Amino acid sequence: MDVTDHAEEIASDLGVDKEEVESDLRDLLEYSVPIGEAKQSVRRKHGGGGGGSSPSPDTVDVGGVTTDHGNVTVTARVLSAGTRTIRYQGDDITIREGELADGTGSISYTAWQDFGFEPGDSLTIGNAGVREWDGRPELNLNESTTVAIAEETVAVDRPIGGDRDLIDIEAGDRGRNVEVRVLEVDEKTISGRDGETDILEGVLGDATARLPFTDWNPRPELQAGADLRVEDVYVREFRGVPSINLTEFSTVAPLSDAVSVADDAPRLSVAEAVGSGGMFDVEVVGNVLEIRDGSGLIERCPECGRVVQGGQCRSHGAVDAEDDLRVKAILDDGTDTVTVVLDDELTAEVYGGGLADALSAAQEAMDKEVVADAIADRLVGRAYRVRGNLSVDDYGANLDATEFEVADDDPAAGARAALAEVAE
């Protein structure tokens, strides 16, 4: 039965407009609400109650919840609870979200109203909907859900509360708290859903890692060098890299003690780094095999900064392109390869001259490729230590370099050692 058939069934039962019912159903399904729960919600909206033919919820352990369940009853411990506002069906709605657990496993939840529970509470949650979110089941707590204090404390082997080191932050986390130093911060104006919006973007660090952040309600406390406790953040993912997001419900407080920040990035083999799916700050060592097309002298769109070909930007069409320098190098350490991207400053260092020098050389030779050729002569066949931010997508792995130096050690030997360790 498709959405139209479900809408016809509800409209026929309640004597209401089918098109309106179908529109409501599709809105709910776009947010991954299970069809059974969506139908109940639409019935209630149109005055038909909950559709009393729905089966009673199954009572299951947390580890036994699957996306095949419609509604369930679980007894679990609240591990975390965060608050944020989302835009849903044109309205701003405040939700609570986090993680629940028992001795069999953990599961994320979204509560569409404030049930009053906090991390550490043991609860029996009845008639919670189950939906699929990012390939995993998630509990959906709505007006049909009941929440009561459990008769006994639920034992769990997971940390209660949102405190985490940056190294343990994962995409999809909600209600997390971190103690960090602000390493970088920039003000930006973006085009948001309500027009132009001012935000802060930058980098946070602690003794374990560094991660990017976005503050959607810019706070004066977020200044470079500030040591802060930041509570109730959620974590998005971009190309496999976790990104910390502060909302209007996040709190920021100065710390009396300085936060230690790791000077070094974790060094991995290229295979380990690529296999992670993306890392914000990582170091690899390898040999440059070749310089890819699109290196040396390039042209960028003045509007979006994308590389243009023949004066044409994919987003803005014909533009008055601006000259720039870039390197895209293939790095190999014996375990895998990655494309290392050098910005204009790092490119100038390896080229031995800035943009003006490159333009002069190209003009003299009447060929832009002389710049890329000169860079290739300097880099290909040599070993380099590269530190930067790794992104992985359907088009491959790219390491945007923040440091690029001649390596003191042998990457082939390092690769052999890494492979031997994996084999053990």
Image: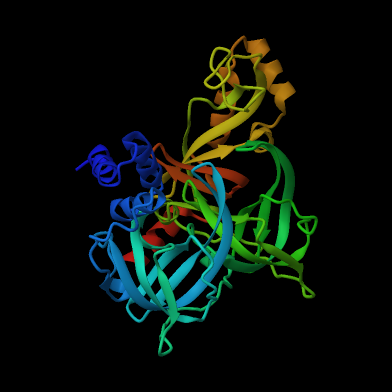
**Depth check: 133 or 423 in front?**
133
Q: Quadrant of residue 164?
A: bottom right
Q: What percent of the width, then of the height, locates residue 361?
A: 67, 17
Q: How many labels does the image show?
A: 0
Residue 282 appears in the rendering: no
Q: Residue at x 59, y 16 (%)?
A: 368
Tell me which colouring the rendered structure shows.
rainbow
Q: Which residue is drawn at 29% across and 51% down?
A: 35
* Rendered view: 400 above or below 157: above
Q: Where is residue 367 in the image (x, y as percent from the top left)?
A: 59, 12
Relative to 162, is 49 above or below? Answer: above
Of the 4 image quadrants, the one containing the C terminus is bottom left
Residue 165 position within the rendered picture, expressed as x and y whole percent measured from the top left: 58, 69
Residue visible at 56% across and 59% down in the picture: 234
Comparing 297 with 98, the one in front is 98
- In the image, taking residue 32 as reference, residue 339 lies left or right, namely right
Say above or below: 372 vs 202: above
Measured from the top left, where is residue 215 in percent x and y? 67, 52
Residue farthest top in this picture: 366
User: Which residue is more in the foreground, 320 or 133?
Assistant: 133
Q: In which quarter of the image is residue 105?
A: bottom left
User: Nearest the camera: 183 or 132?
Assistant: 132
Q: Is residue 310 among the parts visible in the rendering?
A: yes
| Residue at image location 56% in from the left, 65% down from the top | 82
Asked whether, in this view, residue 133 is left or right of residue 330, the answer is left
Name the residue at the front extreme: 15
Please identify the residue farthest to the bottom as the structure is shown. Answer: 152
| The N terminus, quarter of image | top left
